[in-house]
Image (cartoon, rainbow, N blue to C red):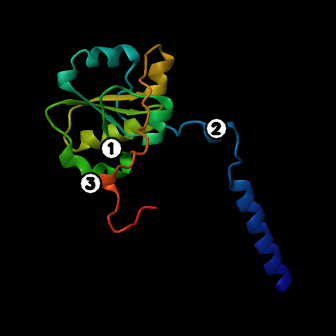
Amino acid sequence: MLKLATVVLLSAVAFAQQAQPSPGPSATAPAEDSSKAKKLTRAEFDALMAHPDRILLIDVRRPDEISTNGGFPVYLSIQNDDLKNRLDAIPRDRTIITVSNHAVRAGTAADFRAAHGFDVAGAIGAQIYESEGGKLVKIVPPGPEAKSETNLNPNVKQR
């Protein structure tokens, strides 16, 4: 009985290992996009941006991704995890374009906003835009503020 249980257990472990995908080149590729949002080309994006008073860019990337890869000069930064909590902060009088690196997260964000009644033009990948000849703005994060005597803790003695 013990031998049978051992064989069954080892068979289950071997089967589970075979069922796991092996990490390969696709492990670093962008996730598969199942979004219904329109993926904007550089030309479509530039045409929409010709009317900045009608457009709102929402960048769903992390701040470090924006500073590393570059972005667009004016945007609202709301990551996908915060979408539900920030819907009231998004103006409804503008057409929304969502931004991520390859338009996958942006597509998800566009779908979410469209489902909540927002006018969404589509999604764009900043790196795709750049690869099509578009120019991104390199955004340098602000450094730490220099301390002055006015913002030092008065309870701490200076040496």
Residue 66, percent across and down? Answer: 44, 35
Name the residue that disc number 2 marks.
26
Query: Tag on residue 31?
Result: none
Name the residue that disc number 1 marks.
78
Decide: few, some or many residues near mark 1? Use Cα within 10 Å; few <14, some 14-19, many ≥20.
many
Q: Which of marks 1 and 2 is in front?
A: 1
In the image, is 159 to the left or to the right of 96? right
Residue 41, percent across and down? Answer: 40, 19
- Residue closest to the eye, 127 or 43: 127
- Residue closest to the eye, 117 or 5: 117
Q: Distance between the residues labelled 3 and 1?
A: 10 Å
Label 2 sits on what residue type? Ser
> Residue at (82%, 74%) from the top-left corner?
7
Label 1 sits on what residue type? Ile
Counting residues from the start of the chain, the first of labels 1 and 2 encountered is 2
Q: Can residue 35 be seen in this view?
A: no
Residue 88, percent across and down? Answer: 18, 48
Q: Can residue 96 be seen in this view?
A: yes
Name the residue that disc number 3 marks.
85
